[in-house]
Amino acid sequence: MSGRRQNSTPNYLMIAKMEDSTQKIVELDEKLEQEQKDLAFIRENLDKSNHLTRSMVSILSSFESRLKKLEETILPVHMETVALQHLQANVEKSLKAFDEVLTYHNVVRDAEQFIKEGSSGRIEDYLRKMGEIQEARDYFKENNPGSPELAKADSQFTMGKESLENEFRGLLNRHSKPVPAIMILDLIEEDEDEGLHAFEHLPEKTVDELSLIAKWLQGPGESFDFIDVYHSIRASALKRSIEGIKDHLMKKSGGSASSGHAMSSPMNLKGKSKDPTKRSSLIKPIMKKSSAYLLIASFESAKRPGSLGSPSVDMREEASMDIETEQFIVGLLALLKLIQVSCLI
């Protein structure tokens, strides 16, 4: 009995070991089977990935091929488009230049009658038209020298310049009139500068027109002849004004300076006595003026302190000298005033 018990114990251990080995084998088989499934899944996915890769490569290759064909098709069209754009830009520049040339041609053509009609009464419009002719003239001179258009533009420019010079001369002649003697005497009797700005040698509109013409003549016109014209005409008007006040003073004194001896003597003035030492009424209103006072003082100091002749002769000579002195002083003051007023134009 004891022997059987000893033999049964090892068998039991062997059976237990075998069962453990079997269990392990089963677990290993299960793991192997799972790994084989995973491997199969991986291979399947790899095949799918390879298939997708080949498809993508094929698509990209096809896309590249199509892009190449599109480029080969579009590139000539693009080059032609660029060429057409250059042509369009050149055509636009040509049209612009052509319009510019036509504009200058039209200016020369349309201005002909306007220039011939003269500048009287439309100085600003005439100067504007002369500016357009000057631009056309400069354009033809630079781009087409020797052309008939340039000769025509030069002719119109010269004609317009002469018209402006004639208008300048005409304005001066029409408005440069001698100043009345009474007005000059009133101007002298006023304060030093009070009446200068109120006095109008030339109408304001005429001064503005003369100024516009003068600026154009010495600018684009390149002419300074108008200065001599202005000097000549204004000097003539000034001279006539001085002569007018001289005649006025001679009439006021009763005759010429040479006949002043008889007219100014105390016994010959219509039976009325006159003190030759008193200043006549012509010079009294301006005695208070500083400039007149200095002139009179200089003449008074030039007189001789005494005389060797008879009293009546001395009185007549002094009276005559008074008249001549008054006329000279008033004439000189009138000249100064007229010059001052002319400087304000």
Image (spheres, helix red, strand yellow):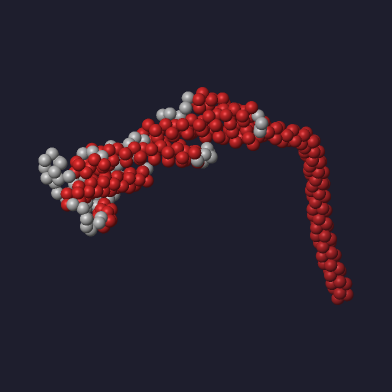
Q: Position of residue 342 (x, y in %)?
A: 36, 43
Q: Is residue 293 left or right of residue 119?
A: left
| 89 vs 49, nearest the viewer | 89
Q: Residue at x 28, y 40 (%)?
A: 246
Q: Residue at x 46, y 31 (%)?
A: 166
Q: Position of residue 306 (x, y in %)?
A: 22, 57
Q: Is residue 252 left or right of residue 147?
A: left
The quadrant of the picture occupied by the N terminus is bottom right
| 131 vs 35, nearest the viewer | 131
Q: Residue at x 48, y 30 (%)?
A: 163
- In this picture, is 285 found above or below 168? below
The quadrant of the picture occupied by the C terminus is top left
Q: Position of residue 338 (x, y in %)?
A: 33, 44
Q: Is residue 114 left or right of residue 237?
A: right
Q: Residue at x 20, y 42 (%)?
A: 262
Q: Looking at this rendering, what residue extends furthest in the bottom direction?
A: 2
Q: Position of residue 343 (x, y in %)?
A: 37, 46
Q: Looking at this rendering, what residue extends furthest in the front direction?
A: 309
- In this picture, is 320 found above or below 126? below
- In this picture, is 26 found above or below 50? below
